[in-house]
Image (spheres, rainbow, N blue to C red):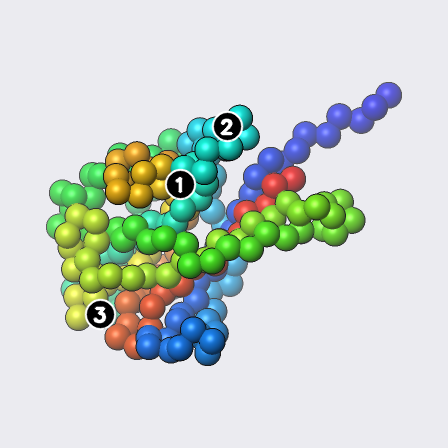
């Protein structure tokens, strides 16, 4: 009898790093500020992958990340992240427009890598790593993103930018939140970077 194996399909993890402000690209070596953290793959991943597999439409490839931040009263204040489940979609981020302190920045990928999690089982590759970093002075809804506003990045999402000029069409593949002790304040001397690894099995 043949053994039936149920694949795990898709799993991911994330870690944060810092990029020193003003560093020339060839010297810009990030230093990591967290260990690997787990993420939650949301239901919209099916909408992204099904279109890529069926049509090869590059509009549905992963285009960037959302970096969610809050402007806290005092440096070092922790942020209480929301609870969420696999139904997470763009509506959550749209609703941040009415939150007085929270917003998100929509940033493009700075790089990506393709490789193998196991050279014997997956010699033709099965792993993707995406890199992005904080940028800009305000969030999508216009709130200041700056060290002077005590901005703290406390969560993120991996996103397909179906239309780079229209965030309302974005599709989310996965999301996560930092533990309070590992939330990333915006500093004047550096940008916050994320390394997001996905493994298909």
Q: Earlier in the sequence, mark 3 or mark 2?
A: 2
Give the image quarter of residue 95.
Answer: top left
Residue that mark 2 sits on: 55
> Under tag 1, what secondary structure?
strand
Disc number for residue 172: none
Is residue 172 visible to us here? Answer: no
Quarter of the image that includes the C terminus: top right
**Residue 134 position within the rendered picture, expressed as x and y whole percent measured from the top left:** 32, 61
Going by the picture, which residue comes out furthest to the right?
1
**Label 2, label 1: how far apart the Cα atoms are:** 15 Å
Image quarter (top left, top right, bottom left or bottom right) of the N terminus: top right
Q: Say if 152 sits above or below 53 in the image.
A: below
* Left or right placement of residue 124 versus residue 80 in this view: right
Q: Which residue is mark 1?
A: 160
Whether residues under marks 3 and 2 lie with C-beta atoms below 8 angstroms apart, the answer is no
Tag 3's secondary structure?
loop
| Residue at the disc numbered 3 | 147
In this rendered view, identify the residue nearer to me: 113 or 155. 113
x 51%, y 32%: residue: 56
Residue that appears at 56% across and 49% down: 128
Which mark's residue is nearer the viewer, 2 or 1?
Answer: 2
Q: CA distance from mark 3 to mark 2?
A: 43 Å
Crowdedness near tag 3: few (<14), some (14–19) or many (≥20) residues, C-alpha within 10 Å: some
Neighbours of disc 1 within 10 Å: few (<14), some (14-19), many (20+): many
Determine the residue located farthest toward the top in the rendered image: 1
Regarding residue 167, the answer to whether it shows in the image is yes
Q: Position of residue 148 (x, y in %)?
A: 17, 70
Q: Nearer the viewer, residue 77 or 170?
A: 170
């Amino acid at each position: 009898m043949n053994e039936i194996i149920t694949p795990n399909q898709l799993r991911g993890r994330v870690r944060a790093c810092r990029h020193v402000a003003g560093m020339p690209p060839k010297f810009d070596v990030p230093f990591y500020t967290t260990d690997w953290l787990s993420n939650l793959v949301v239901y919209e991943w099916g909408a992204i992958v099904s279109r890529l597999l069926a049509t090869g439409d590059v509009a549905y490839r992963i285009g960037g990340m959302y970096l969610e931040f809050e402007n806290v009263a005092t440096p070092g204040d922790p942020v209480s992240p929301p609870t969420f489940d696999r139904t997470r979609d763009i509506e959550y981020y749209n609703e941040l427009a009415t939150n007085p302190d929270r917003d998100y920045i929509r940033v493009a990928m700075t790089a990506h890598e393709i490789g193998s999690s196991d050279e014997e089982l997956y010699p033709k590759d099965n792993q993707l790593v995406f890199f992005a970093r904080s940028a800009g002075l305000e969030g999508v809804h216009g709130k200041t993103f700056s060290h002077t506003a005590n901005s703290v990045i406390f969560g993120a999402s991996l996103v397909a930018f179906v239309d780079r000029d229209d965030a309302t069409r974005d599709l989310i593949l996965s999301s996560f939140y930092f533990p309070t002790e590992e939330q990333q304040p915006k500093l004047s001397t550096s940008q916050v970077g994320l390394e997001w690894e996905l493994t298909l099995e």
